[in-house]
Amino acid sequence: MAIKTCLMIGGSGMAGGWIQNFTGNFGDRVKIVGLCDVSREVLDRQKEALGLGENQLFTDFNEACAKVKADFCGIATPPQFHSPAAIAAMENGMPVICEKPIADTLAGAKAMVRTSQKTNLPCAIIQNYRYSPNKQELVRIRDEKRLGRLQHIVGRYACDYRVYESWGKAWRHDMDFGLLFEGSVHHLDMLRFLSGGDCETLMGFGWNPEWSSFRHYSSGFYLMKMTNGVHSFYEGNSSAAGITNCWHREYYRAEFEEGAVEIAEGNQMTIHRIGHNSEVYDAPKIEHFGHLHLFDEFLSWLDGGSPSATRIEDNIKSFVLVIAAMETTVDGEPKQIANYLSDLNLYV
Ligand SMILES: NC(=O)c1ccc[n+]([C@@H]2O[C@H](COP(=O)([O-])OP(=O)(O)OC[C@H]3O[C@@H](n4cnc5c(N)ncnc54)[C@H](O)[C@@H]3O)[C@@H](O)[C@H]2O)c1
C-alpha cells in the first residue's frame, strides 16, 4: 500500500485531532501535503509540526483544492463549510473523508452526494461512535439473535452544557438546532445502526429551557419507526443538570424478545432477563476505536477495498433524520423519511 497524500482542510479543534492521528497512528499510510485553515495562527503552528512550506498553506479551500494534487482530502471544519469544500475537492479529483454532520443544509448534503456520484469518487463521513466495543457487541447480540427478536431501543444523550461555550465552541451555542446538528446526528445514526433498519417515520418535539446557554433548542424527544419494524425513542438534552450521559457515556437500552441489553459508559454490557440475575460482562475488544476505524477503512477503500460503511450514500439516510427532526419540531407533523430521499439515486 503506497503512502497516500492528503490535503487537510481545518487545522485545529477536531481537525487537530485528525492531524495527530494521521501523523501518529497512520504515519506509514498518510502524508499531509497541504493544509487549509482560515486562521493564520493555526497554519503557522501546524506548518512547524508538519514540516510544510509556505506554498503548501492556504486560507481559502477553493484555492487549496485547485493547487494541491493530493490522493485524498480530509475535511474537519464547522459544518457550513463541509459541502463547498468537499465539492471543490471532488471536482479537483480528490476523494473525501469529512466530519459529521454531512452539511448544514439538506441541499448542501445532496450536492455532496451528487458530486460523489458524478465524479465516481469515494466520500466517507465520520460516525466514530459506531466503532466502540459495546455498540459492536450489541449489534452482534441482535444479528445472532442471542435474545431473540428486537422490539425497540431507547437512546439517551444528556450533557451539562448550561454554561456558555462549555460545548467547546461558541458557535455550537449560537447556531439553530445545535442539539440536532452537532449532537443528535450521532445518536440518530446510532439508533439506525443498533436497530439494523432505516427510519420510515420520525416525529417529536424540541424546546429550549429558560436557563439554557443555547440561543436555540437545547433539548428534544424524538420517536422513530424503522423499516424493519423496530421502534426507537431518543432523549437529547444539552441542558442536563441531574443524570448525565455525555459523550462516550450515552445510554442505550435494547428490548429483545427474551431480555433487555443496557449499554452506557465503558465497555460494560448488562443483560437483564426476568427471573435471572443480571449478566454483566465486558464487550470484546475491537481492533480500531472510533476515528481510527474510519481512517483505516477509508484508506483501504482507496486501495480497492470495500467502501466505508458510512459512505455518503448511506450516511445521508442518517443526516435526513436531523432535517426531519428539525421540521417536525417546527410544524409538529410526523415525517416520512423516504420523501427526503426520493430525488436521489441511492445504490446502498
Ligand atoms: N466526530 C466527533 O466526535 C466530533 C467531535 C467534535 C467535533 N466534530 C465535528 O468536527 C467539525 C469541526 O468542529 P470543531 O469543534 O473542531 O470546529 P472549530 O471551530 O474548532 O474549527 C475547526 C478548524 O476549522 C477551521 N476553519 C473554520 N472555518 C474554516 C474554513 N472556511 N476553511 C478552512 N478552515 C476553517 C478553524 O479555524 C479550526 O482550526 C464539525 O463538523 C463538528 O461537528 C466531530
Image (cartoon, rainbow, N blue to C red):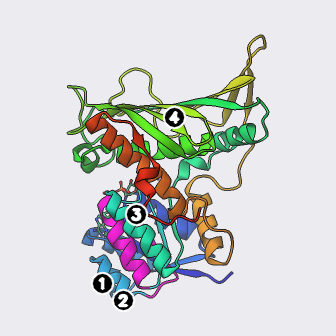
Vertical placement of 252 versus 32: above or below? above
Q: Earlier in the sequence, mark 4 or mark 3?
A: 3
- The residue pinned by badge 1 equals 63
Name the outermost residue toward the top: 275
Decide: few, some or many residues near mark 2? Use Cα within 10 Å; few <14, some 14-19, many ≥20: some
Sequence-first disc among 1 and 3: 1
Q: Earlier in the sequence, mark 1 or mark 4?
A: 1
Q: Is residue 246 above or below residue 339?
A: above
Q: With respect to residue 81, does 331 lie above or below?
A: above
Specify the segment rendered in magenta: 69-92
Question: In the rendered image, which residue does mark 4 sit on?
Answer: 250
For ligand 1, the image quadrant comes to bottom left
Residue 262: where, in percent of width, then height?
63, 27
Q: Is mark 3 within 8 Å of ligand 1?
A: yes
Is 85 colored magenta in this rendering? yes
Q: Which residue is mark 3?
A: 76
Indicate the amino acid at tag 3: Ala
Q: Quadrant of residue 57?
A: bottom left
